[in-house]
Amino acid sequence: MRKKSLWLVISLMLIAAFVFTACQPAPAEEPMGGEETSQEPAAAEEGGLQIPEIEEGKFNVAFVMLSTHDDGGWSQAQYDGIVYLNDQVDGIHTAYVESVAEGADSEQVFRALSRKGFDLIFGGSFGYMDSMEVVAEEFPEIGYVHISGYKSNMTNFGNMFGEMEVMKYLAGMLAGSRAKADGETVIGGMATFPIPEEFRLFNAYALGIQKTCPECTLDIRWINTWHDPIIEREGADSLFDAGAHVVMTGADTPASALAAADREGVYGITYDWSGSCTVPECLTAPYWNWGPVFVGIVEDVMAGSYEYGWQYFDASSGGLGIYGFMDGQELQPGVASLPEEDLQMVKDTLAAALAGDFNRFDVFAGPIIDNQGNVVVPDGERMQQADIDQFAPGAPGLECEYGMYWWNENVTAELPEL
């Protein structure tokens, strides 16, 4: 993947605890996410006390990101999507602000970008949701798209996400198969915060494990961070110390795989970015391919046809992948040696998902039993989008029947207090 230089800017509303950096794309040559591209950020001077400027005569798009553009995970995947967008759509100008804390600090950045005159602003983390909602009401002529979350005003503020549940389900199938083949039964997972997103992704992982290793159990540890290399490494080590044979992360860094590489005979599964699975001990990485998604949204907004609401793209959109199984990729060593019947199950399920014949509702189809012995989803029923997005009973006007406050029957962890 490209190593990018950048120009840094700091928000006008800078507070002492946070430094915000902003960048604008320019020509390059290397491929991103399997596609040829000719864009990457240009180097520029550091330290200006300003939010990036718009370019007159162009459609100006800004991205606000939680971590650095080269974090090796969530934000780097978004950055690659910005580069792809820049290369594919004419007449646009893009900029981004990185390392923006959730909460009040992000509200300052969204408001500053809006005052600059950006036409469309993306918020790249769950914790930006309330801040974007507030600012969107102040600037009704500007479009705001929140990545993850569940809020929308149906006019100029909406949210979008994708069915990563399918890719996590496939990763669970691989983890279960690896443990079973090695005579092990304990698998681990590092969850970030107790929000519906983490419950649905780790429950999908648990359901995948159950497909290939019915006797396996899943130990969940909460690390309460999206991006902290030290805490993530400590969490991975603690799971391996407790007997986990495979550890998957829900956070940004490849700590789960790096911790596995320092041990004998164990494996990690990374997340978010296609370039995160670099060591032989990494089985795979469920990852985001944001470029095609960003292109679709920006083109629709420019055409005046985008509907600000609840967009949840599926695997057939091209916005998702699982490392080792996509075109041009090779299986990791710990996967290539798995039983053929398990590998074929993963390949067949992925092919069905990419063809639109298997989706998140198939992952969460009954019967599903929780780890207290309760029936979560009865046989013949399946969750709906509102169930996947929320805790029951859901938000007013977006009520749900089942919700996501439960652990699958093979999870040994207790439910955290909300």
Image (cartoon, helix red, strand yellow):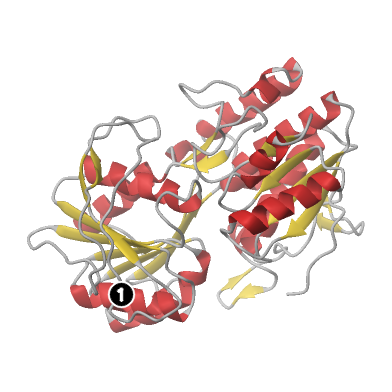
Looking at the image, which residue is at 91% across and 59% down?
Answer: 372
Residue 32 x %, y %: 36, 35
Q: Which quarter of the figure is the N terminus placed in?
A: top left
Seen in the image, is 339 located left or right of residue 126? right
Residue 388 x %, y %: 63, 58
Give the labeled residue for mark 1: 11
Would you place residue 410 above or below residue 105 in this image? above
Looking at the image, which residue is at 37% across and 49% down?
Answer: 79
Residue 281 x %, y %: 67, 30
Q: Amino acid at mark 1?
A: Ser
Please say whether residue 380 is visible from this viewpoint. no
| Snapshot quadrant of residue 413 | bottom right
Seen in the image, is 263 located left or right of residue 40? right
Would you place residue 355 above or below residue 112 in this image? above
Question: Which one is in front, 292 or 104?
Answer: 104
| Snapshot quadrant of residue 93 | bottom left
Please say whether residue 171 is visible from this viewpoint. yes
Question: Which one is in front, 274 or 212?
Answer: 274
Seen in the image, is 108 located left or right of residue 372? left
Tally of numbered discs? 1
Q: Residue furthest left?
A: 57
Residue 226 x %, y %: 58, 60
Seen in the image, is 328 located left or right of residue 267? left
